[in-house]
Image (cartoon, rainbow, N blue to C red):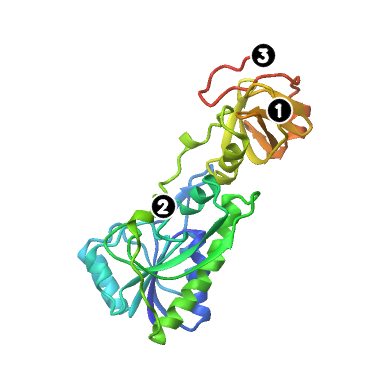
């Protein structure tokens, strides 16, 4: 099948690779613009562009999907189908209606739950024990199109959003392959989404990072997992920012929330008589390290109260 592929981040690369492995003709790869990265702000191509160039595929990086020039370039590619995987831009009706088979999107959730930009992270933040990938026939709405195929995987209690991302990117490639096989065999059945069962997964930002020790440890553990690798959960220790990358729910305690109750492992009391072990942390300007190692370089006495999520000055008993 002749396909135009639209995608940008690392999540989309396995899907593009699978299209080539399955023998489809990718006549054009559409991706977002190169962006400056690192201390030198050097322009770097998005992962999909890098993969496409390595495999000799033509790349198109339009500023807008609504211009006549963009539509003409897509027409020249003559796709039978457009496949969209985390492209990052809304497609206008003229693009959605261009290919004979329309546009199929690979979305990293079990629709209709977690529509939106950050479904993987919100699934972990909310403590879901199952996640998955859904292919859908795109319409003008935000992830509201008819569902085609889906597949799920368990989410262990220690899995981070980054780890789930990697798992679902591979699963997504398989679901896409199965979807296109069914489309070719004319056995694909679309199913409308139930809007009453939907929920939205908005883009993440750093306002989600601060840990509120008055909340139960299980919720804070999900926060740590869901914000790993970005933007990372954080608190303040000795007045300085401390990122928490890996955690574990600890033993029950009667201490007030926010008290360091154990030094190895680095353990802080939380709401509901619970505690959270800070297994891997990162101080300002430092590398990631085990929580116990951090405390060896930044000695704290058991009983120290850590700063809360509101950013108040740390209190010491």
Residue 236 pos. (x, y %): 60, 25
Residue 73 pos. (x, y %): 28, 71
Residue 89 drawn above or below residue 283: below
Single out the residue that lies furthest toward the top.
317
Report the quarter where the C terminus lies: top right
Residue 2 drawn above or below residue 237: below
C-alpha gap between disc 1 and disc 2 = 38 Å
Q: Residue at x 61, y 24 (%)?
A: 240
Which secondary structure lies at badge 3? Answer: loop
Q: Which residue is mark 1?
A: 253
- Name the one closer to the observer, 107 or 53: 107
267 horizontally vs 110: left or right:
right
Q: Upstream in the sequence, badge 1 or badge 2? A: 2
Q: Is residue 65 visible?
A: yes
- Name the one closer to the observer, 248 or 272: 272
Q: Which residue is mark 2?
A: 117
C-alpha gap between disc 1 and disc 3 = 19 Å
| Front: mark 1 or 2 | 1
- Name the one closer to the observer, 252 or 151: 252
Q: Upstream in the sequence, badge 1 or badge 3? A: 1
Mark 2 in CB contact with mark 3 (< 8 angstroms): no
**Disc 3 crowd, CA 10 A, few/some/many (<14, 14-19, 20+):** few
**Disc 2 crowd, CA 10 A, few/some/many (<14, 14-19, 20+):** some
Residue 88 pos. (x, y %): 38, 56
Q: Residue at x 67, y 22 (%)?
A: 259
Q: Find residue 314 and name its label.
A: none
Q: Find residue 316 and name its label.
A: 3
Which secondary structure lies at badge 1? Answer: loop
C-alpha gap between disc 2 and disc 3 = 41 Å
Which secondary structure lies at badge 2? Answer: loop
Residue 100 drawn above or below residue 207: below
């Amino acid at each position: 099948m002749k396909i135009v592929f639209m995608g940008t981040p690392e999540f989309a690369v396995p899907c593009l690779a699978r299209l080539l492995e399955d023998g489809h003709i990718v006549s054009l790869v559409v991706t977002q613009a190169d962006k400056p990265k690192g201390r030198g702000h050097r322009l770097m191509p998005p992962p999909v562009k890098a993969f496409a160039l390595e495999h000799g595929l033509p790349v198109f990086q339009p500023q807008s999907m609504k211009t006549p020039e963009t539509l003409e370039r897509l027409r020249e590619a003559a796709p039978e189908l457009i496949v969209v995987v985390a492209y990052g831009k809304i497609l206008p009706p003229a693009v959605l209606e261009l290919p004979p088979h329309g546009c199929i999107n690979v979305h990293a959730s079990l629709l209709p739950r977690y529509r939106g930009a950050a479904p993987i992270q919100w699934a972990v933040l909310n403590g879901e024990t199952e996640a998955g990938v859904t292919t859908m026939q795109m319409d003008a709405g935000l992830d509201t199109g008819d569902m085609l195929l889906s597949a799920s995987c368990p989410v262990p209690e220690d899995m981070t959003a980054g780890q789930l991302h990697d798992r679902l990117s591979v699963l997504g490639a398989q679901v896409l392959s199965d979807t296109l096989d069914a489309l070719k065999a004319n056995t694909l059945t679309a199913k409308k989404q139930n809007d009453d069962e939907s929920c939205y997964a908005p883009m993440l930002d750093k306002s989600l990072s601060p840990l509120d020790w008055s909340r139960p440890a299980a919720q804070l553990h999900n926060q740590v997992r869901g914000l790993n690798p970005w933007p990372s959960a954080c608190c303040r220790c000795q007045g300085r920012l401390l990122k928490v990358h890996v955690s574990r729910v600890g033993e029950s305690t009667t201490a007030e929330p926010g008290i360091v109750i154990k030094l190895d492992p680095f353990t802080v009391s939380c709401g509901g008589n619970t505690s959270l072990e800070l297994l891997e942390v990162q101080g300002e300007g430092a590398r990631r390290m085990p929580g116990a190692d951090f405390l060896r370089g930044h000695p704290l006495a058991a009983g120290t109260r850590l700063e809360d999520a509101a950013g108040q000055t740390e209190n010491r008993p």
